[in-house]
């Protein structure tokens, strides 16, 4: 299937509404109430949640197209939807009773952290947990949080067969955590990616879950997709969506400059068109690779690493190239790219902040 421009995957009315309040959201340091209302109305935070729990149960390809379109619309909106809907995917690994309780909330939003910066001590009735986790995007809007912990048993860390600490994921309710206003990045300001903590919090055993295909509690194919590649693909489309929007704005800038100054500035328009073509080529390869991996998962009797290593490679290539193209165009766009009040500058700041995510820092 030929991949279209991100603008083709969302109604223009929603694009305009989400984008119109983006500057105000940045000042607020969290998503604007109008943005949040649209997100809940569209059910975007439940894209990866099974219908059994009231979710949209979308295919991965549909999720990626939606997230890329949202990131193209506004980086912070796309990022919060991506990270929080990604945490919603954990529904497939939760105890059924707990999942029904959590996802029955009409404005369910799960924030969290992938860092293992907590310790869960085993008790007779569950776990006692203490930890501090950074960068929980969407923390202001969350109804629940997820976090990784090392497991302590009888005063010692529990180790696996390779001698490494056993790591488990836990779910906390909003009222059980303390938020810390730590988010102070140059971009993605409206994601409100603050830290959270718990201290000596006791939770029952069903708050602990394992994110592997073998531990999925629901039969839906999406819960068999490897978590690493799910994370890589969803984050990559955020960067490509923002890069596409930056290129679009550069093209508008170049066109206006050409009309004013004539052929002497035509090279910039050619640069933007070439950048758009390069990114679109990579986007097509990326979406084709993801689709092939999904099909191989449905057809295979066991999970092979091959299609998923290709997914990882194309995800990183898409992110790297998008960032590279933006940086090549940036110097040609004058103070419009440097003024913090412009959309072009906000995209540049958002893209470079998002690109610092731990999954992609090694590129």
Image: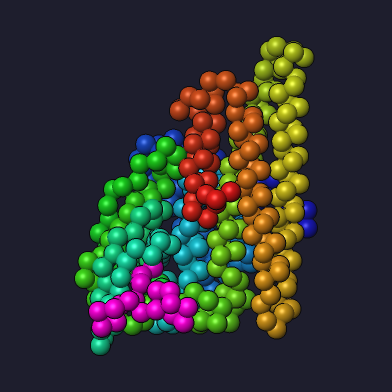
Q: Residue at x 67, y 71 (%)?
A: 305
Q: Magenta segment: does it hold 211?
A: no
- Residue 320: percent from left, percent from top: 63, 45
Q: Is residue 46 above or below residue 283?
A: below
Q: Residue furthest bottom?
A: 124
Q: Which residue is more in the foreground, 345 or 130?
A: 130
* Picture colour scheme: rainbow
- Residue 348: percent from left, percent from top: 53, 35
Q: Which residue is more in the foreground, 183 or 361?
A: 361
Which quadrant of the figure has residue 207?
bottom left
Q: Residue furthest left?
A: 200
Q: Magenta segment: does it hold 160?
A: yes
Quadrant showing the N terminus:
bottom right
- Residue 318: percent from left, percent from top: 66, 49
Which quadrant of the figure has residue 110?
bottom left
Q: Residue at x 52, y 49 (%)?
A: 361
Q: Which residue is more in the foreground, 185 or 137?
A: 185
Q: Which residue is more in the foreground, 332 or 39?
A: 332
Q: Residue at x 43, y 77 (%)?
A: 163
User: Is there any visible trace of residue 281 in the rendered image?
Assistant: yes
Q: Is residue 292 above or below residue 261?
A: below
The magenta segment is 148-165
Total numbered labels: 0
Which quadrant of the figure has residue 243?
top right
Q: Residue at x 56, y 78 (%)?
A: 213
Q: Is residue 215 left or right of residue 252?
A: left
- Residue 142: percent from left, percent from top: 36, 59
User: Is there any visible trace of residue 140 in the rendered image?
Assistant: no
């Amino acid at each position: 299937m030929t991949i279209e421009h991100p603008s083709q995957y969302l109604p223009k009315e929603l694009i305009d509404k989400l984008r119109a309040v983006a500057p105000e959201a940045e000042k607020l340091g969290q998503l604007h109430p109008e943005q949040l209302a649209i997100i809940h109305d569209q059910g975007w935070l439940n894209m990866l949640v099974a219908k059994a729990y009231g979710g949209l149960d979308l295919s991965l390809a549909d999720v990626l197209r939606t997230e890329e379109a949202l990131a193209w619309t506004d980086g912070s909106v796309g990022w919060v939807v991506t990270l929080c809907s990604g945490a919603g995917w954990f529904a497939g690994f939760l105890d059924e009773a707990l999942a029904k309780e959590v996802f029955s909330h009409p404005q369910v939003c799960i924030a969290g952290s992938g860092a293992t910066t907590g310790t869960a001590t085993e008790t007779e009735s569950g776990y006692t947990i203490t930890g501090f986790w950074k960068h929980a995007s969407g923390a202001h809007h969350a109804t629940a949080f997820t976090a990784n912990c090392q497991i302590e048993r009888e005063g010692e860390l529990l180790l696996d067969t390779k001698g490494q600490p056993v790591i488990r994921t836990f779910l906390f309710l909003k009222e059980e955590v303390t938020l810390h206003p730590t988010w102070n990045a140059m971009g993605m300001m409206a994601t409100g990616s603050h830290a959270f903590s718990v201290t000596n919090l006791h939770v029952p055993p069903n708050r602990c879950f394992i994110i592997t295909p073998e531990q999925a509690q629901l039969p839906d194919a999406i819960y068999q997709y490897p978590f690493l590649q799910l994370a890589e693909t969803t984050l990559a489309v955020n960067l490509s969506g923002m890069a596409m929007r930056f290129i679009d704005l550069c093209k508008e800038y170049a066109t206006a400059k050409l009309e004013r100054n004539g052929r002497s500035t035509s090279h910039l328009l050619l640069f933007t068109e070439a950048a758009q073509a390069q990114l679109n080529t990579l986007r097509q390869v990326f979406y084709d690779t993801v689709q092939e991996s999904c099909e191989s998962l449905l057809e295979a009797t066991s999970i092979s690493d091959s299609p998923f290593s290709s997914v990882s490679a194309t995800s990183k290539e898409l992110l790297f190239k998008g960032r590279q193209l933006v940086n090549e165009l940036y110097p040609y766009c004058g103070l419009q790219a440097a003024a913090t009040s412009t959309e072009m500058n906000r995209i540049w700041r958002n893209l470079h902040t998002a690109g610092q995510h731990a999954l992609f820092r090694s590129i």
